[in-house]
Amino acid sequence: MENLTDHAPQVLLVVAVLVGVWPCWSVARYIRADRGTRVSMRQAVRVRLGWVRLARMAGLTVTDKTPGLLAQITAQKDGPAPAPRVLTPRIKVKPDRFGVIVRARTLPQVGLEEYQKAARFLADAWRCTRVSVLPDGPGRVVIRGVRSDPLTTPTEHRPTGRPLEEVSRWELGVDEYAAPVCVSLANVPGVTVAGTPGAGKTSAVNRFVCDLAPSAAVQIVGFDGKVSRAEEGDYADLFKRMFAFCGDDLDEANALFKRLVQLRRRRSSVIRDVLGVKNMWHVGPSRVWPLTVVLIDEAHTFFREYKGSDAETKRLAALTAENARLVEDLVKKGRSVGILTILISQKTTGDAIATFIRDVCPIGLSFAQKTVEAAVAALGDDIRNWPDASPVTLQDPAYVGVAVMAMQGRPGYTRIRTPYVSDADAARVAEATSHLTADPALCLDALLDTTGHTNPGDDDGPAVPLSKP
């Protein structure tokens, strides 16, 4: 006891310091936060203080008629029975610039379904635009309340210039609850991106390329059907990070498609011997066997059906038909050897992208569309059952940069705010990573020489480099 008495002043001093530091730290965080986060921090305080009363009014409490241990010990035999206890779930509240994230416990008869039924009451009480409730592990739920709509709040992305830990991870942006949205491109043969001009397609692809550019395990080839040269189009700033590029010349595009198919065949013939697996994704892409991303913008240019009886029209019709056949080969057979095809077009209807190509691509994004038919072509017929999420509703200028897609593990469709990437940032990243650009065909030659394997032949003749002049 004497020792405790001697140390009492020091203990009190430590407690006082801790009690004083916490408010100072909270004030400092509040001052350093942006305007939106400050509003959310005040909102979080109101949520904490009003939770017990709100939970009772919203039916998120449960009455426990069994007395607690202390009540059982102190209860007298002839005295009144202990009053039933009203149990309220415990919560933890975290603010951000869009609103609050509340993590709550479940109770008997107060589970995920009850929280979801009470979501509209919580939204009104917390003054939120919308509230979502999702499971957060056994016995827990996460309640997301957004005060301002993330879909109408433009965002920007500044590429770091550092390689991604996973090159197969595509970070798209945030959903309508400001939760990050990303998709895995591992074992994905193709992606379709649709939307009206100026809706945000190119910016989304720019972010994708800028994030992948710092990795030597990714090589990119570009096709742009609305320009003749790279310097004239949307990919002028990213051109230096592409090992090959083709404009709207159908003959050049056809030749490049053939070389890509040749690369696919060569990879297919040696993958077991060189990598020891039949699927590249079992070991992942590398510098010597890079993920080859084929970007085909304004894809309808290369697949258009020409109709006419003159010789030139017939020649162009034959070229576009062969282009469709070659791209079909890349999409249907390129997945396991590390070839990813991304097709971008204003509409992905059958007359723009052949259905035997489009329907093989498991991931589809659609920015704003003018017709329900275009939305169905981009996202599937099920989008008719989700009219609130249809890209037809995104024609307002406030929704430029907002896309719709079906996410695995989520019912219906998810709306995503994709960030804007400035041309200056894209040019900066491409310039800084241009030394990583390499021809996948030459990488394969070097790998075969290193491992002592012979260079396999195919029906298209000897290996031809894909690189641009």
Image (tube, helix red, strand yellow):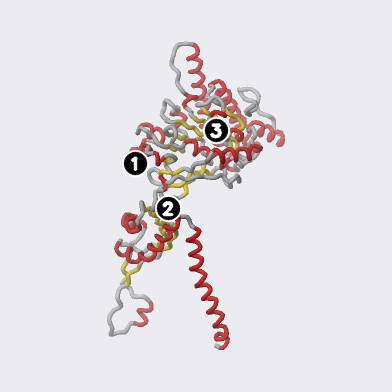
Is residue 375 or residue 126 the one in the foreground? Answer: 126
Whichever of labels 2 and 1 marks the residue nearer the N terminus, that label is 2
Q: Residue at x 44, y 58 (%)?
A: 38
Question: Identity of the amino acid at label 2?
Answer: Phe
Q: Is residue 363 left or right of residue 107?
A: right
Q: Secondary structure at mark 2?
A: loop
Q: Residue at x 68, y 32 (%)?
A: 445
Q: Around disc 2, counting alpha carbons within 10 Å, would you say few (fewer than 14), some (14 to 19), or many (20 or more)?
A: many
Compared with 265, 48 (above or below) is below
Nearer the observer: mark 2 or 1; the answer is 2
Residue position marked by numbered label 3 in the rendering: 235
Q: Secondary structure at mark 1?
A: loop
Q: Are marks 2 and 1 in contact (CB under 8 Å)?
A: no
Q: Secondary structure at mark 3?
A: loop
Question: Identity of the amino acid at label 3?
Answer: Tyr
Q: How many marks?
A: 3
Compared with 322, 97 (above or below) is below
**Residue 107 image position (x, y, % from top left):** 36, 64
Q: Residue at x 64, y 22 (%)?
A: 461
Residue position marked by numbered label 2 in the rendering: 98
Is residue 26 or residue 218 the one in the foreground? Answer: 26
Residue placed farthest to the bottom in the image? 2
Residue position marked by numbered label 1 in the rendering: 386
Is residue 85 or residue 304 the one in the foreground? Answer: 304
Residue 205 disc label = none
